[in-house]
Image (cartoon, rainbow, N blue to C red):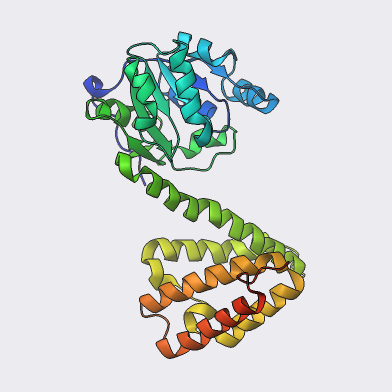
Amino acid sequence: MNAQPLPEPQDRPARLTVGVVGAGRVGPALAASLRLAGHRPVAASGVSDASVRRAAALLPEVPVVPPSEVLARAELVLLTVPDDALPELIAGLTETGAVRPGQLLVHTSGRYGVSVLEPALRAGALPLALHPVMTFTGTSVDVQRLAGCSFGVTAPEELRLAAEALVIEMGGEPEWIAEESRPLYHAALAIGANHLTTLVAQSLELLRGSGVEAPDRMLGPLLGAALDNALRSGDAALTGPVARGDAGTVAAHVAELRRHAPHAVAGYLAMARTTADRALAHGLLKPELAEDLLGVLSDVTDARGRGGSES
């Protein structure tokens, strides 16, 4: 996927001083990317030692100062704190008079649109929600990964061109998300990315337990092909014992997991039931086989009374 061309000069924001409130994994990488586009990072805030080190690595010579001082120095402020901390941060900055009229306030939360910035909007700030659809490591590799990365963007109509320009300058591609759709959009990404990491880590763990010496090398080609097929074909890419209706194999899986990895049973059952439902709905799983399969899943659930979890 190729990054979009830069907007015409009249649609691009002026070169701005940039501040970062919350020097976690995201903020310094975005500020470093904006610096490559000609903007000038001038201040960052961070509490933990890791945050300070991260800011020093990605934003050398940029001072680490309190959040109010970041806002005092910057025309464009990146608010890159955890989702649950964002409303309180915005309220606090606004109540203390740190927010200035005409200041661009950009948060990177997937959950929220621009309504969370309402207190700052009343103080005259210009609100943008720019959520990079990427996992971050907190290292310089993140700046490279922004090339072609989608951003979930929510902005007032009069700021859409500015939002689009900032995203494109960071190498990203804007995808417009309606304010009311942000929670669903974010839930979808969590299912696809966060849960995928959990599933892969659990698969690696179980393969090690079965004696495989290099589970990463074993899984790499398989998962790469599965991801590619799923992105291309959706449910039609389903394979494996659940999609085939191999109830005996699924029952054997559950029995082995109960014996060797009881902590993995609940997740296996939940995913098996969801996979069976989707395979049946899309005509991949024959109804007569689905009955036996769902019967197995129901039996192992009822046997424990808690969805297959171990006490």
Q: Residue at x 34, y 11 (%)?
A: 101
Foreground residue among 296 and 213 = 296
Foreground residue among 89 and 205 = 89
Image position of 253 with respect to 26: above or below: below
Image position of 263 with respect to 279: above or below: above
Foreground residue among 112 and 213 = 112
Q: Is residue 132 left or right of residue 260?
A: left
Place of residue 143 in the rendered image (x, y in percent of width and height, measured from the top left): 50, 33
Q: Quadrant of the C terminus?
A: bottom right
Among the 4 quarters of the image, the one containing residue 296: bottom right
Q: Which residue is drawn at 43% across and 40% down?
A: 110
Q: Residue at x 48, y 55 (%)?
A: 191
Place of residue 258 in the rendered image (x, y in percent of width and height, measured from the top left): 72, 74
Place of residue 67 in the rendered image (x, y in percent of width and height, measured from the top left): 53, 16
In the orientation shown, which residue stands out farthest toward the front? 305
How many numbered discs sit on the rendered protein?
0
In the orientation shown, which residue stands out farthest toward the bottom? 288
Place of residue 109 in the rendered image (x, y in percent of width and height, measured from the top left): 45, 36
Query: Is residue 208 shown to the viewer in this render?
Result: yes
Among the 4 quarters of the image, the one containing residue 209: bottom right
Query: Is residue 210 shown to the viewer in this render?
Result: no
Q: In this view, does 157 lie to the left or right of 138?
A: left
Q: Residue at x 33, y 45 (%)?
A: 181
